[in-house]
Image (cartoon, helix red, strand yellow):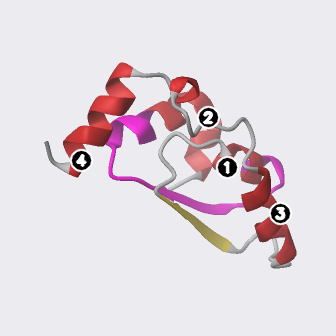
């Protein structure tokens, strides 16, 4: 099985909260972004973001130029569903 098929299978058969790496808030990532002293209009890309909640927290903090990149279209679809209308503010 290739990598893309593997990750599509993960997100087709499991909910994001059911995977071992799920965290409600990615506190360490948020701390690192805060320590960089970037403004709310900074461009941030979450590479391998999958169905991560980092984008949710960044939107809540007022960040506007967000991109989530992942090999799994299913993971990105789940993120869009979770974000609802807020997904319009994320690439």
Mark toward the viewer: 2 or 1? 1
Q: Earlier in the sequence, mark 4 or mark 1?
A: 4
**The magenta stretch spans which residues?**
59-77
Mark toward the viewer: 3 or 2? 3
Q: Distance between the Cα atoms at labels 2 and 1?
A: 11 Å
As helix, strand or loop, the secondary structure at mark 4 comes to helix
Residue, far left: 1
Q: Which residue is mark 1?
A: 54
The one of 30 and 44 positioned closer to us in this rendering: 30
Q: Distance between the Cα atoms at labels 2 and 4?
A: 23 Å
Q: Earlier in the sequence, mark 3 or mark 2?
A: 3
Report x, y in % for residue 78: 47, 31
Q: Residues within 10 Å of mark 2 (few under 14, many from 20)?
A: some
As helix, strand or loop, the secondary structure at mark 2 comes to helix
Q: Residue at x 13, y 42 (%)?
A: 1
Q: Distance between the Cα atoms at labels 3 and 1?
A: 11 Å
Q: Earlier in the sequence, mark 3 or mark 4?
A: 4
Q: Residues within 10 Å of mark 4 (few under 14, many from 20)?
A: few
Q: Are marks 3 and 2 in contact (CB under 8 Å)?
A: no
Q: Residues within 10 Å of mark 3 (few under 14, many from 20)?
A: few
Q: Which residue is mark 4?
A: 4
Q: Which residue is mark 2?
A: 83
The one of 13 and 85 positioned closer to us in this rendering: 13
Q: Residue at x 52, y 39 (%)?
A: 51
């Amino acid at each position: 099985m290739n990598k893309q098929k593997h990750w599509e299978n993960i997100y087709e058969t499991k909910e994001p909260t059911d995977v071992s790496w799920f965290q409600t808030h990615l506190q360490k990532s948020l701390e690192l972004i805060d320590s960089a002293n970037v403004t709310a209009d900074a461009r941030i890309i979450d590479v391998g973001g999958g169905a991560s909640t980092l984008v949710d927290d960044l939107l809540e903090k007022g960040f506007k130029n967000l991109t989530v990149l992942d090999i799994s279209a299913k993971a990105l679809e789940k993120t869009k569903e979770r974000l609802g209308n807020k997904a319009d503010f994320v690439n």
